[in-house]
């Protein structure tokens, strides 16, 4: 039976904080048994808590009952131990351990809890299947690497709060159960028991409420906000996530960007010891797409997209010339000095990947021998081929890949290939490349609904010079929106907001909303704008994504304590769970079959 924990058992020190300066001190430590080693006349126990590991020592000078108890201890038992810190013997020092030059000679020990044999060893050196690790997440979270991640995430949030408090921001909580509003993804709905047939939505962001707080005069708002989106998952996406959410009144876009830059500089310095140079470079959405085929480009390496449309618009290769004549383009990327590592078979795989993301095919030049191997050479004159290779700087040892189509296909396809090849060939250097992407299109065309959607959200301010084109040419309207990108990951999205109720109604109408829909979904916001709205703007930064990138983690699951898996379920608690008939009846709901 486990022993009770009393005041006398309280720890005086964390395990991993002890060192040479503590030699001779009497201490009490508490934690989990990492391992026990029985050497006959000596027993060593490694005790672990969130700060690290310390070695406990028992020998023939120990009390007999204490020595027997130490002999019986097993992995993951929970102990409270009193003893004296002493220097380890010669030859016993462990330079790979923070407390490797000391140990605690144990004078008393309480067994607070015994453990079954764990389904896996609590160690970073053991490979654990994801199904098992997430089923026993409470054990997985004991591993030092995950504990470091979770603790670092806490430090990031702490520094962020302190930074914004110092800059005059007020932390205000916004509701978790709100009115459903379209923000780009499906809402998670909470059916109401009292209002039958009605539902609350969990917020995709605090967007509307933080804008209302600006109308309420709070001037600078900050919140570490929980957000929810019912969308397909991937490595950098979870159905519930946290963002560092801010809004500023009487502020320009530059003010908001500079405020976030200051946060980045402070976080990277204090958490990683990395100096971030300010200001962070800016690039328009159009330039980012043209050069990198992505609105969140990784700029740590080159391989930029090049346009050869003018050269091939009248060539004999109809795939190229036809694309240009139909209003499209022919573009290329060049992988320098990699012909020896990119085989024809590799190119075929890249072509399949390109087709999988929308391209009709992939043309290539592989210059590994004295004469380049070109998939379209027979359709070109030698002069045309030379002109193309000169234009894109393709020489011996290089591989060039070409896509011909409209720009909605050529740019993202080559952007994806650029990133895929760079990762496969390990061409991406270490470092942190921040980049602001600005001047996003206000609208993006939705092929499924055959209508225009807001690329960010419908409360974003368009550029004034674009207002005449709201109805005649929505695709040319640019938004005063901005994203912060780090190494190809979008960390932050923000914008200057519309504050004129007439303009806001006009934007809603441009998005295809009827007056009745505007009133039903956003009537309270439009009404609020009529009572003196200050100019304002803000941003939402993904705390989870930021921690993931700063820690070099592979997935958001590595920085979230209890994450969901691909199908939005949690293996440990087995949620979501079926609803009981009584609960369904109280909510006025019934479940229908998928058949």
Image: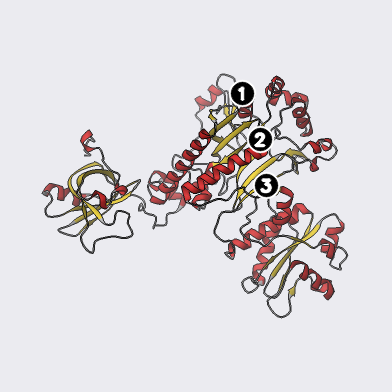
Secondary structure at numbered mark 1: loop
The reply to whether residue 279 is in sight is yes
Q: Which mark is residue 437?
A: 3
Q: Nearer the viewer, residue 470 or 588?
A: 470
Which of the two discs, 1 and 3, labels the residue nearer the N terminus?
1
Name the image quarter holding residue 524: top right
Q: Nearer the viewer, residue 298 or 269?
A: 269
Labelled pair 2, 1 in contact (Cβ < 8 Å): no
**Circle 1 is placed at which residue position?**
217
Measured as percent of width and height from the top left, residue 111 is found at: 22, 42
Residue depth check, mark 1 versus mark 3: number of the one nearer the observer: 1
Task: Using the numbered discs, state the Cα–Cα distance from disc 1 to disc 3 in whole angstroms.
Answer: 29 Å
Q: Which mark is residue 183?
A: 2
Secondary structure at numbered mark 2: loop
Which of the two discs, 3 and 2, labels the residue nearer the N terminus?
2
Secondary structure at numbered mark 3: strand
């Amino acid at each position: 039976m486990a022993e009770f924990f009393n005041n006398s058992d309280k720890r005086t020190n964390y395990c991993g904080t002890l060192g040479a300066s503590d030699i001779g001190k009497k201490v009490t430590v508490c934690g989990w048994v990492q391992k026990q080693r029985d050497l006959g006349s000596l027993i060593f126990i490694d005790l672990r808590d969130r700060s690290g590991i310390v070695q406990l020592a028992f020998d023939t000078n120990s009390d007999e009952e204490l020595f027997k108890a130490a002999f019986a201890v097993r992995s993951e038992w929970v102990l409270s131990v009193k003893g004296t810190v002493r220097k380890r013997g010669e030859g016993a020092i462990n330079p790979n351990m923070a407390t490797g030059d000391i140990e605690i000679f144990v004078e008393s020990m309480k067994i607070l809890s015994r453990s079954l044999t764990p389904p896996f060893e609590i160690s970073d050196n053991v490979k654990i299947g994801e199904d098992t690790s997430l089923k026993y997440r409470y054990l997985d979270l004991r591993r030092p690497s995950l504990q470091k991640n979770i603790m670092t995430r806490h430090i990031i949030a702490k520094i962020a709060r302190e930074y914004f408090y110092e800059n005059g921001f007020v932390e205000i909580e916004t509701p978790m159960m709100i009115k459903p509003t379209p923000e780009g993804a499906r809402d998670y709905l909470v059916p109401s028991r009292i209002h039958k047939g009605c539902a609350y939505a969990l917020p995709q962001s605090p967007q509307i409420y933080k804008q209302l707080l600006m109308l309420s005069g709070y001037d600078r708002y900050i919140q570490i906000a929980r957000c929810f989106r019912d969308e397909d998952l991937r490595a950098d996406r979870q159905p519930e996530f946290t963002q560092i959410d801010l809004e500023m009144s009487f502020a320009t876009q530059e003010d908001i960007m500079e405020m976030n830059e200051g946060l980045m500089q402070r976080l990277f310095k204090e958490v990683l010891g990395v100096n971030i140079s300010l200001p962070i470079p800016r690039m328009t959405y159009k330039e980012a797409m043209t050069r990198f085929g992505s609105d969140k480009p990784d700029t740590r390496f080159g391989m930029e997209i090049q346009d050869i449309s003018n050269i091939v618009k009248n060539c004999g290769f109809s795939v190229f010339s036809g694309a240009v004549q139909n209003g499209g383009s022919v573009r290329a990327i060049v992988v320098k000095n990699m012909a020896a590592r990119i085989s024809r078979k590799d190119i075929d795989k890249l072509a399949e990947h390109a087709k999988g993301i929308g391209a009709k095919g992939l043309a290539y030049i592989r210059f590994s021998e004295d004469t380049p191997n070109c998939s379209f050479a027979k359709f070109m004159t030698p002069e045309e081929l030379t002109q193309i290779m000169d234009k894109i700087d393709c020489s011996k040892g290089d591989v060039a890949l070409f896509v011909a189509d409209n720009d909605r296909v050529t740019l993202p396809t080559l952007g994806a290939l650029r990133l895929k090849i760079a990762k496969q060939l390990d061409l991406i250097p270490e470092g942190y490349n921040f980049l602001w992407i600005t001047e996003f299109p206000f609208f993006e065309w939705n092929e499924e609904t055959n209508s225009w959607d807001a690329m960010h959200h419908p409360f974003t301010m368009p550029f004034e010079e674009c207002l005449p084109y709201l109805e005649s040419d929505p695709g040319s309207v640019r938004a005063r929106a901005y994203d912060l990108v780090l190494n190809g990951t979008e960390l932050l999205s923000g914008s200057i907001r519309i504050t004129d109720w007439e303009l806001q109604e006009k934007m809603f109408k441009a998005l295809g909303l009827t007056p009745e829909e505007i009133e039903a979904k956003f009537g309270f916001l439009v009404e609020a704008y009529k009572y003196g709205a200050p100019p304002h703007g803000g941003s939402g930064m993904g705390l989870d994504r930021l921690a993931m990138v700063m820690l070099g983690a592979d997935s958001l699951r590595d920085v979230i304590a209890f994450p969901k898996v691909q199908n939005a379920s949690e293996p440990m608690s087995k949620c979501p769970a079926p609803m009981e008939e009584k609960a369904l009846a109280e909510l006025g709901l019934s479940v229908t079959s998928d058949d």
